[in-house]
Amino acid sequence: MNYCVVGLQWGDEGKGKVVDILAEHSDIVVRYNGGANAGHTVIVGDSRFALHLLPSGSVRPNTTCVIASGVVVDPDVLIKGIETLAQNDISLNGRLLISENAHVVLDYHKKEDQLREETLGKNKLGTTVRGIGPCYADKVGRSYTVRMADLRDLENLKAKLQTIIEYKNKIFAALYNAEPIRADETFEKCKSYADRLLPFIADTTEFLHKSIAEGKCVLFEGAQGSLLDLDHGTFPFVTSSNSSALGMSAGCGVPAERVDEFIGVVKAYTTRVGAGPFPTEQDNETGQYIRDKGNEYGTTTGRPRRCGWFDAVAVSYGITIGAIDSVALMHLDTLSGLRELKICRAYEINGQEKTFFPANTARLSKASPIYETVPGWDEDITEVNDFQDLPVNAQNYIRRIEEQLGKAITIIGVGPKRSQTIFRQ
Ligand code: GDP
Ligand code: IMO
Ligand code: MG
């Protein structure tokens, strides 16, 4: 079986945990979009790993890991990730493939991201400042780019960087009155990236197609979530890749038909980091309760996450555009202790009831959630491993969400550890 795991909200749904669990029965795990803006948490025994570029399957020593061409690779972060695993006796030698066509995030991308956010002031997007937007912008612009394959030809790369950095410095000076960056320093860094990463650079599209033809089990790991999708999310408060399920095929060159099951991951409530509309946000005691209990602080930036009720309109949208087959609902344990819970079943916009999510930010900003209220539960459920043993109100909450989404919830998270997971047929 080939699976694809994607977030159906605004990221941080718990994809890392789900991918880690499914990776036990996968030969290959593939990251296909985004970059080091992602932070996927995997807990193995007493060790906690925050993976930014390496697929979440990388903690399993027999899994082959692929970073496909749709990813923008920050070599500093990647090398650090490889070293962190090595310090934990997990080697990636011989089992990591990085696409030769993946674009490289360099220091000037991060600088540009930061300067742009600072200049926007109160209108900033709230990016992770990992250089994601500027790197994808260069990729689409085509003229000033570095791809992983360029690390194979340092002579040529040196000349290329000269041109790129001359151009970037003009922008830094004219738009931001900022200090120039030095081409020779960037080149020296690229030389060290080449030393470290050349053995991993490959044609990942060929590898994936051969592996699928041989009957290998491939697990595709999405980063971010459907509502952050560049084309289909809450633009401009999105990331710069197609982070809904639609991005999977473009990101790795494997058609969606090769995937047997698309699994959408959601939290039992909603969170968002960064700016943008969030209809069910609870900027109050309830939101604070969820933030404290769920430890809702960003894996990549440490920022407090905005928290709110489960939004079935928003999640249904990701299911529809991505043809999601089943749902994993994480963080159910975080809701224990709330007297009642709300599920947003529709929006009211300009006096009309809507159940199809309006991704257009101007319209979404006018949406008032229409809630259904259900009773909560008090019990600690972090040790429950059978659906029937959950408090009746927790079972009913899940069934109600299933009805709203029209999809089965087959995986339920009751804590961050692997063992704190309920599987249902
Ligand atoms: P990702 O970006 O989708 O992989 O999610 P993150 O790793 O950024 O954030 C999810 C956080 O929730 C991590 O700290 C996980 O360890 C934690 N987590 C995952 N599933 C559960 C769950 O079911 N319950 C609780 N309490 N924590 C969970
Ligand atoms: P994972 O894979 C949550 C958000 C940022 C910001 C917007 C644009 O861990 O779920 P960017 O740096 O991509 O230009 O920022 O997207 N964002 C995420 N939010 N989880 C993520 O990844 C995110 N990656 C980007 O907070 O609002
Ligand atoms: Mg995350």
Image (spheres, helix red, strand yellow):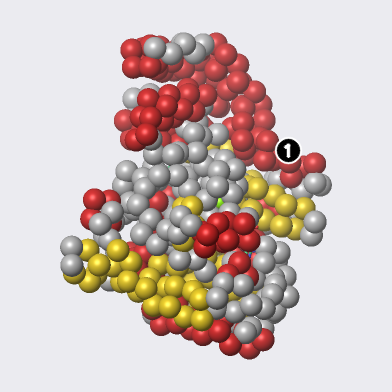
Q: How crowded is mark 1: few (under 14 residues within 10 Å), some or many (20 or more)?
A: some
Q: How many labels does the image show?
A: 1
| Residue 39 visible in the displayed image | no
Q: Quadrant of residue 97?
A: top right
Q: Give the quadrant of residue 115.
A: top left
Is residue 81 visible in the rendered image? The answer is yes
* Residue at (67, 67) in percent of width and height: 415
Name the residue at 73% across, 75% down: 383
Residue designated by label 1: 83
Q: Where is residue 106 in the image (x, y as percent from the top left)?
A: 51, 26
Q: In this view, does 276 lie to the left or right of 37?
A: left
Q: Which of 297 and 85 is in front in this view?
A: 297
Q: Nearer the viewer, residue 276 or 24?
A: 276
345 lies left or right of 388: left
Question: Circle 1 — which element?
Answer: helix
Please identify the quadrant where the N terminus is shown.
Answer: bottom right
What residue type is disc 1 on? Glu
